Amino acid sequence: MTVQEERRVRRVDPDLDAEQEVDFGSYGRSVARRWWLPLLGLVAGAIIGYLLSLGGGTVYRAQALVYLGQPIGPAGNAAQALNSNPATSREIVTSESVIRQVARDVGLRPAELRRNVSATPVESTARRAGATGLLQITVKGKRPARVRAAANELGTILVRRVSGYSRAKLKNLEAQLAGDRIVLESLNDALAAPNLSLDTKLLLQLRLAQIQQDIASASQLVSFTRNVESPSLLTRASARETTARGQRNSIVVGALIGLILGTIASLLWEPLVERRRAQA
């Protein structure tokens, strides 16, 4: 390549870095010349965000806390029951049949309740593998009394649906306990009879001691089944007021969007004006 051709190539090749610097500089100057457009967008966006936050109104949130229970099998190990898996409880709470039943009972539309209900395991218990623990049922809406009633009824239905194992176990234990008490009463009557032989009296006393021990064991099992194994509505819901949209966040987001749109408008102003002039 000759010296003349090399000079020609150098004149043709663009300096990309220089062009970028010129472009960014021109963008900055365009925005600076029309500074009022970004400012107008900022103010307008903040006003719109504020109005939207007011338009969102106030909603109420009600939370019921359900203890799912810990079923124990005959061998003393954890039993597999409906309440052994929190996912099963969530499915029950959000199932269509339950949503429709509760909505009808509390006076809400099914669609309104369906999109505003959730069931979440409490974090401290959900972290432990295999733990059932606590489930928090949350209902949101604009009518506090109905929101509260819906959360409480959902909790009650869930407890009833997942209590089959513990209810059957408790029923058997209570029947056993009632039978032991009848036997205990009859033994006491027999021991009060006159003219008992020594051998008979010793046998009755041994049987009495055994029945008393059975009653004590059965009573402990009944208490354990009621308080540990059985699901329960641990805390009933009460409606608390909460804002549908955070006012501060709405203003900040609206102002940011307005600033961006105003900046874009200032950059497009000159090309649009020049195009109109060319068309005219």
Image: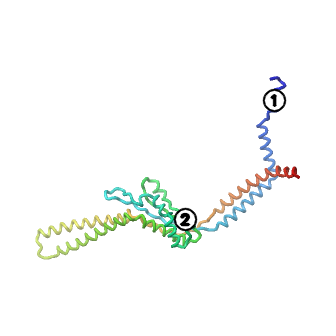
The percent coordinates of residue 16 (x first, y second) are 77, 37
Mark 2 or mark 1, which has the lower sequence index? 1
**SS label for mark 1:** helix
Quarter of the image holding residue 17?
Answer: top right
Contact flag, marks 2 and 1 (Cβ < 8 Å)? no
The percent coordinates of residue 150 (x first, y second) are 52, 69
Residue labelled with disc 2: 114
Along the line of sight, the residue nearer the viewer: 161 or 205: 161
Residue located at (20% from left, 68% from top): 208
Question: Which label sits on residue 155?
Answer: none
At label 1, which amino acid type do we have?
Val
Viewport quadrant of the N terminus: top right
Name of the residue lying farthest toward the bottom? 194
Along the line of sight, the residue nearer the viewer: 30 or 213: 30
Residue 236 position (above or below residue 71): below
The percent coordinates of residue 57 (x first, y second) are 64, 68
At label 2, which amino acid type do we have?
Arg
Residue located at (48% from left, 61% from top): 91
Residue located at (34% from left, 58% from top): 73
Question: Which label sits on residue 9?
Answer: 1
Image position of 234 (left or right of 145): left
Mark 1 crowdedness (10 Å alpha carbons): few <14, some 14-19, many ≥20: few
The percent coordinates of residue 37 (x first, y second) are 79, 55
Quarter of the image holding residue 112?
Answer: bottom right
Image position of 257 (left or right of 192): right
Give the alpha-carbon distance from disc 2 to disc 1, as whole Å: 70 Å
Along the line of sight, the residue nearer the viewer: 43 or 158: 158
Image position of 45 (left or right of 84): right
